[in-house]
Amino acid sequence: MAGRKNVDNQTKKLFPDEQRDLFEKSYMEEMEERKNRPVECLGLTFANNEERRKHFLGLLREKLLDPEFRKIEGFPIGEDEDILALSDPPYYTACPNPWIGDFIKHYGKPYDPNIPYRREPFAVDVSEGKTDPIYRAHSYHTKVPHLAIVPSILHYTEPGDVVLDGFCGSGMTGVAAQWCGAAPKSYRQKVEANFKAQGLTPPKWGARRVVLNDLSPAATFIAANYNIPFDVRAFAKAGRKILKEIEQELGWMYETLHADGKTKGRIEYTVWSEVFTCPDCAGEVVFLDEALDQKTKRVRDAFPCPHCGATLKKNKMEQVFETRTDPATGEPWKRVKFKPVLIAYKIAEKRFEKRLDFRDFEILTKIEEMAFPMSIPTSGFAFDEMWEAPRLEKKGLTHVHLLFLPRAVQALSKLWQKAAQHPAPRTRHMLLYFVEQAIWGMSLLARYAPTHFSQVNQYLAGVYYVASQHAECSPWYILGGKLDRLGKAFRNGAARDNIALINTGATAHLDMPNDSIDYIFTDPPFGDNFPYSELNFLVESWHRVLTNSSPEAVVDRSKRNRSKQKGLFEYKRLMKLCFDEYNRLLKPGRWMTLVFSNSKNSVWHAIQEALISSGFVVADIRTLNKKQGSFKQVTSMAVKQDLVISAYKPDSGLEERFKLSAGTEDGVWDFVRTHLKQLPVFVSKDGLAEVVAERQSYMLYDRMVAFHVQRNVTVPMSAAEFYAGLMQRFSERDGMYFLPDQTAEYDKKRMSVREIVQLELFVSDEASAILWLKQQLSQKPQTFQDLHPQFLKQIGGWQKNETPLELSTLLEQNFLRYDGKDAVPGPIHSYLSTNFKDLRNLDKDDPALMAKAKDRWYVPDPNKAGDLEKLRERALMKEFEEYRTSTQRRLKVFRLEAVRAGFKKAWQEKDYATIIAVAEKIPDKVLQEDEKLLMWYDQAVTRMGGE
């Protein structure tokens, strides 16, 4: 971004006045020269940026006249002039960007299958960088810090590669992509040291190109101002000018007299309190007057009524409503009653508090009588289509302008008007970017938080909540310090021309060529975490360009409009469309990093199913320990933590070969070999190594099955046959499987650590119990008596609908027991001869060894496990048949493994009707939270729908 690094307050102090004037003059001359410097854009050359902007705005204006252009899914709701006012084409358009394909063609690199590319999964530390000035320059509902994204982009890409984020929010992925070419030396050294410690190839520094997209115009406007360069000094100067003009024109509104009755102070904020009635005497109670403890500055749970002395609690009192005149319409308007109770003000640098006096009330009355400004939006909240906003309706706050008290209406509208009238487009956009950050903080959503140091932006994030106490802040109190911080944050910024392109529209419809993106980093909406379009409505109303929420991928909890509601099924369908588009755009063999935050297992399984069914293969899933800022690898079982998912698009070679070998053993092992190439070979930290979950036999089997199912190909072998083939073809180390060249690397690195840390397992159903037993018996063959007390401690609560199984049943159906008659089996012999000195060097039929080994359970050799699997499958299918023929409408308790086995067999036999029929008998929550059942069911629904 424009501006010199040495132009700051410290530099000014070093120069005498004359030298400072010369320096300022030199800077202004340089900036003027830059304005008239020729610029290149999409292969075209313009005399300056103003000519470039004028050319593309003209083209965009013509495009907006095309009815077909406006039919693009996700096209925002707004008039042409408002869309044009927000846009800075071709870099940013507040609508689908017509130049997105040109950007890729001009700056991207065509996919070439002959250029070798290989990367291992890389986990991103999403807890890093939340105090960085750039990150804090503008708030948004959910943000991954750019400093947390930079290492991932460095790992997966080369300078000049194109990165995509289809759910860009405030544009942090773009900032990160540009930061790769502008990071300071200290940060580079830190990242390089981290790469070296992990055994990764040193990063190649240099900016990456980036395409950012979001459905919300509010989001893309923030992203554009983060990622398009601007003159920082000109912005700061214009911002100071606006604040000064506001003070000259409206400063009287924020004046109050000191206790001496003469000295004027400037108000920082006025505290307003909601008014209630006492249930005993019906007297009015000004909540803060009675409930606020002046010593502790905390609101008391109970307090006496000022009229009758009765003990009051907030939830036992009734709100008082008053009828006012809507300033925009002149019609009567009923809302909850607020009264001003306190003023916080400053004289020089000293702060004071006071009760309002007669003059303060006079000023408020005078303000209320002023003409209503035309620049403030008067849009109504569509409560029938919202799930957070309806709480506003209960307080009588039905329209945007009603969320602002009269003084805030005048001040904020004047700020917005002055920012919007600035003649320089980039400075104008940055001024609006600056002013819009006061919208929530100057509304009734801003709570009074007496125990906090500052009252700036004390609203509850992610909700429309009007508290019983409101801090009405002055514009200088909110924006004065913000302007200084923005100047410092962007002074050393990374944004450059021709690096970022921002699109406003649906992620499922991006007008770019196939196989054109080098890497995707994405943080999509997860279920009903946030109603993004609803929360953005307040700010977008000021811009007069609104989100078109019809393709928004959320679980919609609006209660009034059933036709608009989106459940988990609709959410998964919409997310699949987005992932389908990601898969189309990503180059074969390249990676996508997906950050996931949701406490609901059903949402996690829905998004994982959408991801896999779109053709991606998951290679790594990690949870983030927020306290330690570290990662812990997990399996794809139920997770209620923040996740980082690494997935890749299979290379074109595998897909082509699979078409020829689909449904054969060759196809199975070709997939496994290709998948193993993509997995990390060795992961260590602090002298400890971890088991890579994806390299374990059952995970490889699950990935192989999913790969076949999503391509509608019959799985040609059973689990036992797969495990046996795995042992024959690949090297096994610590329960993981490797390619030959990976084995040598693993063995070498294994010697550098103290021990291997096993994955933690939480036993909650039959599948996890089997995994736990396999882990225990692989390390140490044991008798039932040894295992039973451990097993009872391990069970943390069997899932509600899962049939609890006895340990004896689990052992009999999945493992083998040595009866003491024949030679001691290899796994038991190996364990005993290693751990007992007196049993070493004994033959397998030695009586002493046989006696010690008797009744121990052990994991069967995969070559001998086939018969055991057949017996188990027979028992499972017998139970599944009972479920199929049951006349019960709903199965309350059942054996989940039996349903999984039945679904798999029915799918193999193309008996989709059976899958759907049994699924209807299973509780929806169980179906949605089990990834295997969900996969078979979704495929069955798809096949039935296509027939």
Image (cartoon, rainbow, N blue to C red):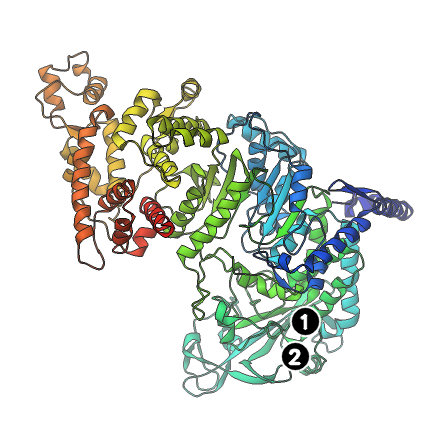
Residue 817, relative to residue 621: is it above or below?
above
Residue 157, relative to residue 170: is it above or below?
above
Callout 2–callout 1 Cβ contact below 8 Å = yes
Crowdedness near tag 1: few (<14), some (14–19) or many (≥20) residues, C-alpha within 10 Å: many
Q: In this orientation, does residue 335 appear?
A: yes
- Which of the two residues, 133 or 675, is positioned nearer the viewer here? 675
Three-letter residue code for mark 1: Ile
Residue 874, relative to residue 55: is it above or below?
above
Instruction: Please tell me in which quadrant of the rendered image residue 842 appears.
Output: top left
- The numbered dot on residue 215 is none
Crowdedness near tag 2: few (<14), some (14–19) or many (≥20) residues, C-alpha within 10 Å: some
Can you identify the residue that label 1 sits on? 376
Give the quarter of the figure containing the N terminus: top right
Instruction: Please tell me in which quadrant of the rendered image residue 44 appears.
Output: top right
User: In the image, what residue occupies the spot 13% across and 25% down?
Assistant: 818
Can you identify the residue that label 2 sits on? 328
